[in-house]
Amino acid sequence: MASLHLVRHGQTTSNVMARLDTRPPGAGLTDFGARQAVRFGLERPDVTPIALYSSIARRARETADLIGTVWGIEAQAVADLHEVQVGDLEDRNDDDSVRAFRDLIADWFAGHTDRRVGNSESLDDLLGRYVPVIESLRDAHADAPGDVYVVSHGAAIRLVAAHLSGVDPEFALENGLPNTGSIELAWRDDAWTCVHWGGVDPARPSGAVTVDPMG
């Protein structure tokens, strides 16, 4: 495997409404979200994917299926790659709930990995289910040429990618992923290295602040 690409799903109605939508199956893609997924595939005509995976959530599966159609490869849904679970905040979009979730993400990036809010998962919970899947995919494709693509979810991708690659937590907090944005990780010398983060160079932070609560 040359690189691992963690791709955020296309736009959903929950994204448009800034709704905290984490429990699978969740919302599907909007028409615009479907076009984003197709465009992601079309804009990468020279990729050599050896595998395409997604979380079990509807929006991730739909995104991966559309990308796979463009590339001529079948997507596979895998358990435990879904978004970090927000518990009692699920399906809410009021200011207090969104702020509580953003504050929780900030606490996690600050190192308080066991914190929860409203029966949510902790960062430890997320990493405990998500990282073993990434490790199994790495091992399964270790000797194969080409790249592996995983369609997943904005907050989970950033948290896991920062954990794996050691990217500066403040950078990871401030630089969210747009729909179909991606993070590329490379396995080098028995460690993950961040090659790109949503088009931003991790070595040269942009200072952009995440607006989408799930980005």
Image (cartoon, grey):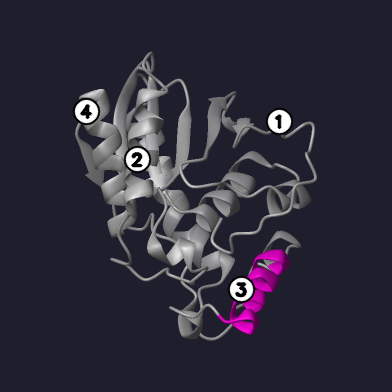
Whichever of callouts 2 and 3 sits on the residue coming sooner in the sequence is 2
Give percent across and percent down for residue 66: 26, 38
Disc 4 from disc 2: Cα separation: 18 Å
Question: What is the CA distance from the residue labelled 2 to the residue labelled 3?
Answer: 29 Å
Which label's residue is closer to the chain start, 3 or 4?
4
Q: Which residues are magenta?
A: 94-107
Reading the image, the residue beneath label 4 is 73
Label 2, residues with CA under 10 Å away: few <14, some 14-19, many ≥20: some
Residue underneath mark 3: 101
Frontmost of labels 4 and 2 is: 2
Q: In terms of secondary structure, where does tag 1 sit? A: loop
| In front of the other: 50 or 177 | 177
The outermost residue toward the front is 31
Q: Residue at x 45, y 79 (%)?
A: 90
In primary-sequence order, the first of circles 2 and 1 is 2
Tell me the mark number nearer the camera, choosing from 2 and 3: 2
Quote the CA–CA distance across marks 3 and 4.
Answer: 36 Å
Q: In the picture shown, does residue 29 fall above or below 37? A: below
Q: Is 164 positioned to the left or the right of 179 in the image?
A: right
Q: Which mark is residue 35?
A: 2
- Quadrant location of residue 197? top right
Please state, as top left, top right, bottom left or bottom right, where the N terminus lies in the image.
top left
SS at badge 3: helix
Q: Which residue is mark 1?
A: 201
